[in-house]
Amino acid sequence: MNRTLTALALVTTVVATPAGCDRPAPPASSSATSVGSTGTPGLATARVDVAAVRAELAALTVSAEDTGNHYRRADWPHWDQVGGGCDARENALRTQGAGVRVGAGCRITGGTWISPYDGVTVTTPGALDIDHLVPLAEAARSGTRAWSIAQRERYANDPGVLVAVTAKSNRSKGDQDPARWLPARDRCGYVARWVAVKHRYGMTVDRAERAAITGVLNHC
C-alpha cells in the first residue's frame, strides 16, 4: 500500500475548558504516527505505529452515536482568521501545497496539491475542498453535546484536522465514519489520524466504527 499522508500544520495552543472537552490537536509526531520526507513538497510518509493506534482506540469511550445532537453548520463557526490576512481555509491551502502562490488578501492563485484520499494531483485551488478529517456532523454525534460554541469553533478551525482534498473525494465521504467510508489510498494513515483526533478531543466511538478501524489496522 502506498502510504502517503498530507503534512499538516498543527495547533499547539490549549484552552482550558470544563470537563476537558476541548483538547489540543494531535502533535506533528505522535505515538500513533511519525512523519518522514517523501521528496515531494506538501507530502509526507506516515509510518503507523499500529500498537499505539490500538491503545488510543481502546481508550475511547464506546457509545452509540448521539443522533439527537443535530448538526447545524452555524453551531460550528469556521474559517476564522488565523493571521497574515488568511482564514483557516486559505491557510490549509497555503500550507498543504507545493509552490503555492498567494495574492492580495491571501487569495490562493496557484500551486500543486496531491489529494491524500485519492492521490489526484490538483493545480487549480478551486478544485479542492477543505475536509474536516472527523467531519463536523460526526463530531456532533460523538459525545460533544456539552461543548460550548468556543470549543466547537476551536475544533472547526484546527489546522490539525483540516485536509485539502479533491471535491469528488470529499463529497463521496460526506459526514461518514470509517464504518461507511474509507479513502482509496493510505487507509492505515487515515484511521490512525482519525483515532488521534478523536482521542485528543475526547470524542466517543461507536461499535461499528471501532470494528471498521480495527479491521483496517489488522492489515497495516
Image: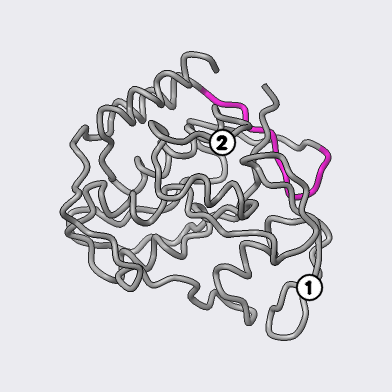
Residue pointed to by mark 1: 109
Kindly report which numbered mark, 1 or 2, lies closer to the viewer in this rendering.
2
At 63% from the left and 51% from the top, the residue drawn is: 165
- In the picture, measured across the screen, residue 128 lies left or right of residue 80, that is right
Q: Which residues are magenta?
A: 39-49
Instruction: Assign a secondary structure to mark 2.
Output: loop
Give the vertical position of 127 relative to 85 (above or below).
Answer: above
**Of callouts 1 and 2, which one flags the residue occurring earlier in the amino acid sequence?**
1
- In the picture, measured across the screen, residue 52 lies left or right of residue 167, that is left
Does the magenta portion include 130? no
Quadrant of image for the N terminus: top right
Q: What amino acid type is highlighted by mark number 2?
A: Pro
| 10 or 101: nearer the viewer | 101
- In the picture, measured across the screen, residue 5 lies left or right of residue 121, that is left
Instruction: Assign a secondary structure to mark 1.
Output: strand
| 212 or 95: nearer the viewer | 212
For the view shown, which residue lies furthest in the top direction? 218
At 25% from the left and 49% from the top, the residue drawn is: 141
Q: Quadrant of residue 10?
A: bottom right
Quadrant of image for the C terminus: top right
Could you give the CA–CA distance between mark 1 and mark 2, rounded to whole angstroms? 27 Å
Horizontal and vertical percent position of residue 151: 30, 64
Q: Which mark is residue 183?
A: 2
Horizontal and vertical percent position of residue 107: 71, 78
